[in-house]
Amino acid sequence: MPHPNTHPSPHDASPLYVDLDGTLTLSDTLYESVMLLVRRNPLNLLRLLAWLLLGKAGFKHKLADAVRPDPARLPYHERFVQYLRDEHARGRPLVLASAADARIVGEVAAHFKIFDAVLGTHGGAGGPNLSRAHKRAAIDAHARAGGHTTWTYAGNSHDDLSVWQGSTQAVAVNAPPAVVRALQRQHPQARVFAQEPLKLKTVLRAIRLKQWSKNALLFLPLLAAHSLDPALWGLAALAFVAFGLCASATYLFNDLLDLPNDRVHRLKRYRPLASGAVSIALAVVLGVVMMVLAFGLALAVSGGFAAMLLAYTVTTLAYSLWLKRVALMDVLVLSSLYTLRIGAGGVAVSVAPSNWLLAISIFLFLSLALVKRCAELEELDDERAALAPGRGYQPRDLASLRSMGLSSGFLAVLVLTLYIDSQNSQALYAQPEWLWGAAPVLLLWIMRIWLKTGRRELHGEDPLQFALRDPFSWVTLGVMGAMGLAATVGL
């Protein structure tokens, strides 16, 4: 497969017409706009359905009237952008030609300052959708009006094959192998910027497979009840998979809504969706498939568990759409989602978790949710940002959030110590006094993670993900598990 080179071809004096979606940008501005509109209000989906009746050009015009993506926050094909800058420096005419709404095309061109003109869809004027034959005709007319009888086109999709038929030279950018093969039958000397293959590792990162570890909370009711029934553990395992699929689907939806903010975040901009490694269309398909599978498995467990999963889904979507931007409400929702997992695990195996367990989890996970927010705020430069992107906090809130978080963590330990002398503890454990050894260990772990947060050693990372790769956290878990075992068997 040919690779890009830096030597001008004999046709380099001809104007180069550049496609936008999938070529210059790794994303699609139409999908980006749809996500922006849905983020404003989910009911806007009804408006989108109504606009579809206007045809492609009319739909794009109405959508661009409502929202337009910020060109500075779109992911671009960097090697191709550098190629365009080099061509511009040589004096070659560059034109951004896209089926996207003309206003979006113009704003992207203005962002780069290397394009001499733009061609786009003018839906408001009743013009055609500028793709395939319509784009080819528009480019040909524009080139002739500028005194050029030949022109070069850079595109990426099957729709661009009909445009390449009219070009003298061709450039394929990020195009699927089948499109490249078809193009090379038309233009054997086509310049190719090869498509990066989508790897399974990238997809697993997009669905956040590592976050499935949080769903281990579904097994807590069985552990707390000291049950060894294989049938119940099988149900819990099925519930674990259902919750994992559902959580991955909601993570994808959350990332789709958070694209503009993630792309300006120091770490989150490398996420598969934010970087353009996984397309919006693929993310939507994956999300829908996983959600259907999740509820199919949930119904196989029980109707009650499916209801709990539905409650989790609704709460998570409400968090993604609105609650995450409401200060303090966001951390309460996050902590409740962890506790909801424990409740769902109990429903799945028909073992009711004790109020003690639920109280400990609420306070502990509220503390960890506040750790996450404080870690994000620690990353902000006071002179650069007044608010955390997509959040409702300011850097000056750090002191208050730290005090809330430490208090919540200490309350979790307090509830644990009160539980040791409770009737529940006396009934379940042979020697509950061993649990006193777990209290200072948990207290030390909470104080340590808050100390690391203040020292900016979490780097905005999820505290549970940090704990999974932290040896001290594993030692803490092992010691607490040993104390629980000793209390159970009565050493």
Image (tube, grey):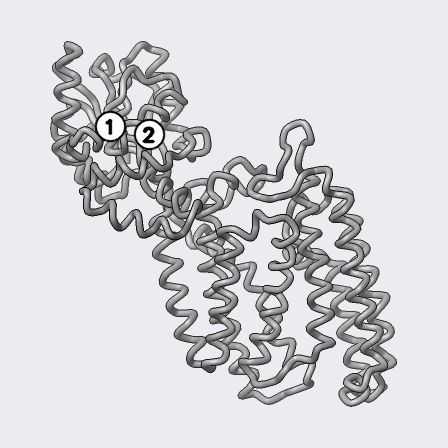
* Label pair 2/1, CB-CB below 8 angstroms: yes
- Specify whether 276 is left or right of 389: left
- Residue at the location (42% across, 34% down)? 74
- The residue that mark 1 highlights is 120
Q: How far across and down, in percent of the image, does residue 223 sit? A: 67, 80
Viewer-side residue, 286 vs 316: 316
Q: Work out how far the residue at label 2 is from the one at label 1, CA to CA, in angstroms.
A: 8 Å
Q: List x then y, in percent, for residue 182.
A: 17, 39
What amino acid does circle 1 point to?
Gly
Decide if residue 212 is on the left or right side of residue 159: right
Task: Provide the residue designation for mark 2.
Answer: 104
Say whether residue 92 is visible: yes
**Amino acid identity at mark 2:** Ile
Q: Is residue 184 visible?
A: no
Q: Residues within 10 Å of mark 2 (few under 14, many from 20)?
A: many
Looking at the image, residue 61 lies above or below residue 149: below
Q: Which of the 4 quarters of the picture holds residue 290? A: bottom left
The residue sitting at 50% across, 57% down in the picture is: 318
Q: Name the spot of residue 127 as percent of width and height, x first.
A: 16, 30
- Image quadrant holding the N terminus, namely top left
Residue 81: image location, x then y, percent: 38, 25
Give 465 or 55, whichever is nearer the viewer.
55
Give the tally of numbered discs: 2
Asked which secondary structure carries label 1, the reply is: strand
Specify few, some or many for label 1: CA neighbours under 10 Å numbering under 14, 14-19, or 20 or more: many
Q: Which is more N-terminal, label 1 or label 2? A: 2
Quarter assignment of residue 438: bottom right
